[in-house]
Structure formats: structure tokens, C-alpha cells
């Protein structure tokens, strides 16, 4: 190989002297147009100055990896008949439907074709899908399934707990519940339509996270004789909203809270203990706390715990209310 150009000779990172972008992805063709041949690109990869993102797309090694970066890379190479679908489409629309493994493992991009050919590239999950013109919209330079179509697809194809979370997320985004229910019939005969038909009426835009949505589905599966309410506010004696309960039934005063790993820590635990104590002592709620193991673990124990907790709360409601009244009288 001829001597290396000055801009990549004895450097640790590429900088603004390089004729190729150092802050965003670029294609092999773009590099060649800038005077960087394929052999030099390979050498830059081997030296750790560039890294490949997708076949035919590179980025400077100092650019942090992210799903946004991968989507930008895909936008450079996807042909017109390829559409972002499913979890990737949800992410583009601003709905968290990524797998839980995405915390430590970059998910594949869901890029499906509307013609007979699929994309075969590393880091891409692909196939073919029948899409109507009204199922697709442009987001920047990419074709993406609309929020309504993405809701229907994820409601059909994901594990039921993740599927309801996706439905809830799109309802928060503004998908019309009535329009969603009306759309279901067009998927008759499609894989997963029975799940979609069951889950769509349970959608609730009050759920603020996927685990809260999953916990609510456990409530339904436990066949508790009360529709769960989301984000239940409790007020202090002056009428100021103080604490909010993730999920529950106000009539029986039974509440369920999901505590994720983000709640770990001494200060957070003390705050949560004080909140739960106030709800029990001052507002006579019967509360249960659930974790990832309860909601997503192999035993899926949340349903049984919710059923037992609700029945216990219903049986003890009179006693708890009388105790609260007695304590209030003594305090006055």
C-alpha cells in the first residue's frame, strides 16, 4: 500500500483533517467519493480508527454506539421498498418496546421488505410484510410503519406482557383506542390476532412503564373482580396530592407498586418505606410491592400475589377503615 495520507498517519483518533465524517456514519461509496479507497478503509478498521456498523457503513471509533446511530446507518443503505417495523418503529416513534436485553446488548434493527427480497445484513432482523400505503409514513429519510400499524403488529407478535406495554405506550403517544379496536378485524387470520383482540381493550394510557403494564396484565390474568386503576393519587389533609399508586382499586383500597432496580439505594428505600407506611397508616391502603422477578420471572408469581393481596384487602377493609377513624378521633 502507498504511504498513508497525512490525516491518518500516526494518529490515535481521526479528526477534522480526515476527508470522511468523524461524527456520523458514512458508506463505502461516500468514502470512495471523498478519496478514501476500500483498501485504506480496511486498514483504518484494522488500526481501530473506524468500525463497521452495517455492511457497507462505517463510523469513526470515537462515536458512541447507540440505536439512534444504527438507525442513521440503516438510512444510508436501505432501499425504497424496506420499512422500519415492530420494535425499531416503536423506538423511532418514541415508544419503549425494546427487549429488556437492550440494556446491555444492542438490539437488531427490524427492517422488513414490502417486495419479495429481504435485507441480509448483520445487525438486521428482516423478512417480508404486506403493508398498505396507509400503514407507512416517512420519518426523515426512512419509511416507518405508522403508530397504529406498529401498535397492531407489536400487539400480535410480542410476548403478551411486552405486547400490552407496547399498546399502552402507543395510547400515551396518541393512538385512538376506538381506532385501534376497529383496526383489529383487518388482521383476521394473521399470526397473533387472538392475542391482539384480547389485549387491545385492556390498553391504558395511564401506565407509565412496561413493568407497570405487565403488572396490570397479571391483575387481569388473576381474574380479580375489579378493573385495575392506574396512577391513583392520594392527597394530604389539605387536599394536596402527595403520593401516587401505580395500580390498584380505590374501593377496596388495595394497591400494587412495581419497584425496579432504579429504586435500589438506601435513600430511595427509606423514601419508599415512608411512602408505603403513610398510605397504610393515614389512608388505610393495603399495599404490595412487586419486582422484576415477580413480573417477568420464570414463575410469573405476580398473578397469585395480586389475587391473594386483593382478597386480603377486601376482607380487612372494614377493620382498616374503623382503625383509621378511631385514630383520627383520638388525634382530634
Image (tube, grey):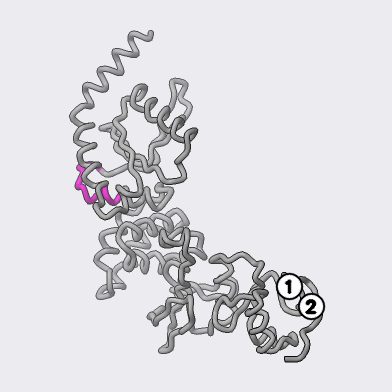
Number of disc labels:
2
Quarter of the image for residue 185 reads: bottom left
Q: What residue is shown with label 2?
A: 7
- Asked if residue 173 lies left or right of residue 202, the reply is right
| Vertical relation: 77 (above or below) 238 | below
Residue, x 78% and y 87% (percent of image)? 3
Task: Give residue 135's mark.
Answer: none
43 or 289: nearer the viewer: 43
Q: Which residues are magenta?
A: 216-226
- On the image, the x and y values in percent for residue 135 come to 43, 73
Q: Secondary structure at mark 2?
A: helix
Quarter of the image for residue 159 reads: bottom left
The quarter of the image holding the C terminus is top left
Quarter of the image for residue 7 reads: bottom right
Compare marks 1 and 2 and give the one earlier in the sequence: 2
Task: Give residue 14's mark.
Answer: 1
- On the image, the x and y values in percent for residue 27 come to 63, 82
Amino acid at each position: 500500500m502507498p504511504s498513508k495520507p497525512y490525516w491518518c498517519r500516526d494518529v490515535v483518533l481521526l479528526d477534522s483533517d480526515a476527508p470522511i465524517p468523524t461524527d456520523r456514519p458514512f458508506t463505502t461509496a461516500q468514502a470512495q467519493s471523498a478519496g478514501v479507497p476500500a483498501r485504506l478503509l480496511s486498514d483504518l478498521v484494522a488500526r481501530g480508527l473506524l468500525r463497521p456498523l452495517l455492511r457497507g457503513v462505517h463510523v469513526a471509533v470515537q462515536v458512541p454506539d447507540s440505536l439512534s446511530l444504527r438507525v442513521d446507518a440503516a438510512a444510508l443503505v436501505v432501499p425504497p421498498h424496506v420499512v422500519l417495523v415492530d420494535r425499531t418503529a416503536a423506538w423511532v416513534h418514541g415508544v419503549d418496546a425494546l427487549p429488556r436485553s437492550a440494556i446491555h446488548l444492542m438490539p437488531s434493527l427490524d427492517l422488513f421488505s414490502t417486495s419479495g427480497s429481504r435485507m441480509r445484513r448483520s445487525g438486521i432482523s428482516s423478512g417480508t410484510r404486506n403493508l398498505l400505503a396507509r400503514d407507512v409514513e416517512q420519518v426523515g429519510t426512512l419509511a416507518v410503519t405508522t403508530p397504529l400499524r406498529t401498535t397492531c403488529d407489536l400487539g400480535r407478535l410480542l410476548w403478551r406482557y411486552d405486547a400490552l406495554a407496547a399498546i399502552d405506550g402507543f395510547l400515551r403517544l396518541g393512538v385512538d383506542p376506538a381506532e385501534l379496536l376497529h383496526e383489529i378485524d383487518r388482521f383476521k387470520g394473521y399470526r397473533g390476532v387472538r392475542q391482539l383482540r384480547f389485549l387491545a381493550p385492556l390498553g391504558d394510557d395511564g401506565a407509565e412503564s412496561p413493568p407497570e403494564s405487565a403488572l396490570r396484565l397479571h391483575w387481569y390474568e388473576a381474574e380479580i373482580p375489579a378493573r385495575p386503576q392506574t396512577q391513583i393519587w392520594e392527597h394530604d389533609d389539605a387536599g394536596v396530592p402527595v403520593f401516587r399508586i401505580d395500580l390498584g382499586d380505590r374501593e377496596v383500597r388495595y394497591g400494587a407498586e412495581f419497584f425496579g432496580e432504579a429504586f435500589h439505594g438506601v435513600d430511595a428505600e427509606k423514601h419508599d418505606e415512608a411512602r408505603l407506611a403513610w398510605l397504610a397508616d393515614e389512608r388505610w391502603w393495603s399495599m404490595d410491592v412487586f419486582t422484576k422477578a415477580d413480573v417477568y420471572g420464570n414463575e410469573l408469581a405476580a398473578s397469585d400475589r395480586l389475587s391473594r393481596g386483593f382478597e386480603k384487602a377486601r376482607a380487612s377493609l372494614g377493620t382498616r377503615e374503623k382503625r383509621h377513624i378511631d385514630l383520627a378521633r383520638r388525634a382530634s
